[in-house]
Image (spheres, rainbow, N blue to C red):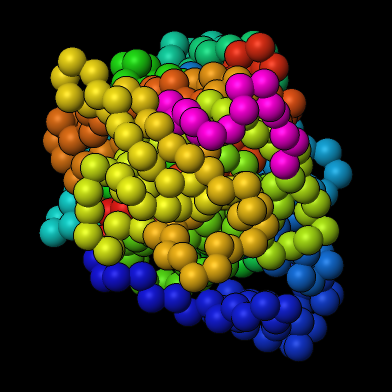
Amino acid sequence: MSETKSTEKTTENSTPTNFIRNKINQDLAEGKNDGRVHTRFPPEPNGYLHVGHAKSICLNFGIAEDYQAPCNLRFDDTNPAKESEEFARSIQEDVSWLGFEWEGEIRHASDYFDDLYNFAEELINKGLAYVDEQPAEDIAKNRGNFQTPGKNSPYRDRPTEESLELFRNMKAGKYADGQMVLRAKIDMAHPNMLMRDPVLYRIRRLHHIRTGDKWCIYPMYDFTHCISDSIEHITHSLCTLEFEVNRPLYDWVLDNISAPSRPQQIEFSRLNLAYTITSKRKLTQLVEDGKVDGWDDPRMPTIAGMRRRGYTPQSIRNFCAAVGISKVNSVTDMTLLEDAVRNDLNDTVERRMAVLDPIKVVITNYPEDKEEMLEGMNHPKIEEMGTRELPFTRELYIDRADYRESANKKYKRLVKGGEVRLRNAYVIRADEAILDENGEVKELHCTYDPDTLGKNPEGRKVRGVIHWVSAKYAKEATVRLYDRLFNVPNPGAMDDFNQALNPDSLKVIKAMVEPSVAEAEPETRFQFEREGYFTTDRYEHNADSLILNRTVTLRDSWNG
Ligand code: ATP
Ligand code: MG
């Protein structure tokens, strides 16, 4: 796999171009599909959507937005064993949260079970499908392999009437699960293994979330997918590269039934993200084994997880645009995603101060009974974002890392005898550090200069600016510091990816935050100055119990 190379060129206010859009433009110019464009996003409701699905969503719904065309949301629900209502609900929520709207009602492949059945009979009647009674092992064995052609089934040339009757009986529930299947009659020596008389229907007595117990035969994916597209009059059926080998079958089915319309399948490369996994099966395993706290654990690469972590829909959309659409498989660096998040949050969220590792500061020349209400800019560059009240008191907290007994000039923080500005407040000087029995700083005694509010002291050297909160008014908050879930670049390639789980992917600390954070609704994002971007937890945060998740650090701490 190569490094990400984007073929999609996006600049602000310009429409991206890529080979798929070029093809659509060409089709429009040639008057194909009566000048229509219609896409769809067809997830299987067997797990939560992940960042790879976001790429497909942005592609399909993005094309729909740009061409003012419809995009359907269709649940590919032909495998009742693994599907659930919870997954279906989460998928709808994720697509909406990303800011996209599907056309009309949600579709289901299962809506078309009757049509699919009738198209299967059409194939039988045309002599293009037959009921095969070979045991499953024989079917597999007789398919041959890449070197050897397959062997025709002894049932392959049975009369049409016989297949038709057996197929009707299959539907009527007269046979046991697995006793026989319906197969397309294509070519057992075809170089593409998928074309060696693929199975179209199998008998499975499974309760379906939508059709209940109406059916005991279920259509296979390859048969269902192309026909569903055709019924919905999809013009461009976009899917990932691994389906390239399925395209001849997609075309064969549509060419041999009275298809309502003739969609075209076009493949693009999957999104692979370094240091994580984008396989639903493996994500399911993480959830089921309790390695994470559910599908929406903020460490998960799921859309729900990224949301809970504080990523914005826009940042995910910008990321997908930056990755682009191509036919080259590659691995995308996590930095690209995190930078998209930082860039979006930098311009959109309010600043607050939070001290993650507090030490107490006593301003010895600030009167005991005095309190002031200072003002903090909510955004350093965007005045319209307003200001907030910041109580200033004799006792404050600053971060442990912002004080040293002595340090060289590169240390832009507080040292004994040196001065720093407290953000949005005064200049202070450190006079004395009170140590505990372990030699750690327990309390700092400082003095402040009352003439330095909003202006710098003339002719004096201030090392830097640090953040602080009032000890009296600050609120305690539980802060979850997230790091990467895996500590190897490609955990998906390991036999056991559990070996690569990062034991430090979650650290929970108690921090002291500005009082205004207590007023924030769940899912409010902030930049804690000098610390990073944080969001109040979607589910657990409230005014009495402040819970914040770290979305992303201010700078990339992995690549230095
Ligand atoms: P998984 O491999 O994780 O099980 P899937 O492809 O089986 O995913 P679906 O629910 O069938 O999951 O996916 C819905 C759509 O999303 C499909 O069109 C699929 O091609 C696309 N998709 C899935 N994973 C990715 C990915 N990593 N990058 C881009 N598109 C993806
Ligand atoms: Mg799939």
Q: Left or right of 149: which side holds 133?
A: right
Residue drawn at x 58%, y 33% as measured from the top left: 366
Q: Identify which residue is drawn at 80% across, 51% down.
A: 386
Residue toward you, 381 or 537: 381
The percent position of residue 345, horizontal first and vertical second, equals 61, 54
Q: Quadrant of the C terminus?
A: bottom left
Which sits in the foreground, 155 or 297?
Answer: 297
- Name which residue lies at 48% across and 40% down: 447
Locate residue 380: give its quadrant: bottom right
For residue 357, above or below residue 447 = above
**Residue 240 location, x and y as percent?**
46, 58
**Residue 233 locus on image (x, y percent):** 76, 57
Q: Is residue 364 visible?
A: yes
Q: Position of residue 514 (x, y in %)?
A: 62, 31
Q: Is 359 contained in the magenta span?
A: yes
Magenta region? 356-374
